[in-house]
Image (cartoon, rainbow, N blue to C red):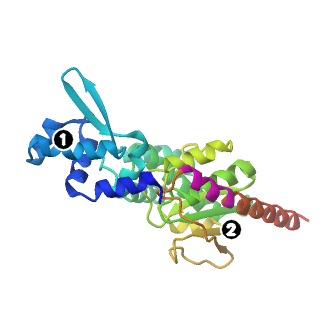
Amino acid sequence: MDAGTDAALTSLGDPTRARILSLMRSSPEGRALVGRLATELGLRQPTVSHHMKTLLADGIVTREPQGRQVWYSVAPDAADRVDAILGRPRQTASVDLDRLATDLVARFGERVDADQIREVIADSHARLSATDAPLLASRTFSFAASRLEALAAADSTATPPSVLFVCVQNAGRSQLAAGILRHLAGDAVTVRTAGSAPTADVRSTIVAALDEIGVSIGDEFPKPLTDEAVRAADVVITMGCGDACPIYPGTRYLDWDLEDPVGKPLAAVRGIRDDIDRRVRELLAELRSAEKVNTR
């Protein structure tokens, strides 16, 4: 465990400090004053100041003086660790499901029944709402569209090979693998990801580790594992998620034994990324070889 993670665990082991950070994150300004925190917590200001000094020393919060007031907020470098320990703050969002349905029927109406499209939208919205995902409307649309593409692909024989990467949170290993495979294969391989217990966002260290090697995460986000994603895949690769995937005849299943990057510093994530990169390149070579055999 790195020093930053160790400090976060130590600081947040105190329930009062955990409540302080929760209040700070949920405030409209995303920051807080000691006096206001003391009032909300029912504590004396010196008590709150003592806890804030500890959080500041451990790099969990930042201090911003403005005139006679001093504002505290969660340090950007500690945000992922705080979210991992406390969970992400719940968000509310307005989603026009009828509008989404109209747009997706326009795209898929000739390949998928309209009632089924509406069912997929409603189910996608419910699943993402359970993960406290931000940008709920646009992500509901994207997740539903991905599921409908999988449904349509399952009924077609003229499609490129499809690979599904599955890990627990769909925020680390599976996103690394998917990003690298998309980068290397382009449109020659259909790449999907899912999580057996997805979190709300791809971790910042994963985005940074991919960017270092020229790979963009694009608009990818964690998605729940669905039956149609597994059914549409030619290869399903699991990474530490146990027996979460349903088994279908004709689908190839692989389990990659990989270290979990959650809570690890960027230096450690680089090693995991490079291990995955090697495996992905081997997989792509196998897919290309099989493609040549099938076209002879």
Q: Residue at x 57, y 44 (%)?
A: 208
Q: Quadrant of residue 23?
A: top left
Q: Is residue 159 visible?
A: no
Tag 1 secondary structure: helix
27 left or right of 151 in image: left
Tag 2 secondary structure: loop
Q: Which residues are magenta?
A: 266-275
Q: Quadrant of residue 257?
A: bottom right
Q: Nearer the viewer, residue 289 or 124?
A: 289
Residue 234 is marked as: 2
Q: Nearer the viewer, residue 138 or 268?
A: 268
Is residue 270 a member of the stretch shown in magenta? yes
Q: Residue at x 26, y 26 (%)?
A: 65
Is residue 282 a member of the stretch shown in magenta? no
Residue 49 is marked as: 1
Q: Quadrant of the C terminus?
A: bottom right
Q: Is residue 127 visible?
A: yes
Task: Check disc 2 and give the amino acid type.
Answer: Asp
Chief SS of the magenta region: helix
Disc 2 packing (10 Å; few <14; some 14–19; many ≥20): some
Dot placed on the residue nearer the N-terminal end, 1 or 2: 1
Position of residue 176 measured from the top left corner of the image (x, y, whole percent): 61, 55
Position of residue 78 measured from the top left corner of the image (x, y, whole percent): 40, 46
Disc 1 packing (10 Å; few <14; some 14–19; many ≥20): some
Position of residue 119 measured from the top left corner of the image (x, y, whole percent): 42, 59
Q: Nearer the viewer, residue 98 or 71?
A: 71
28 left or right of 253 in image: left
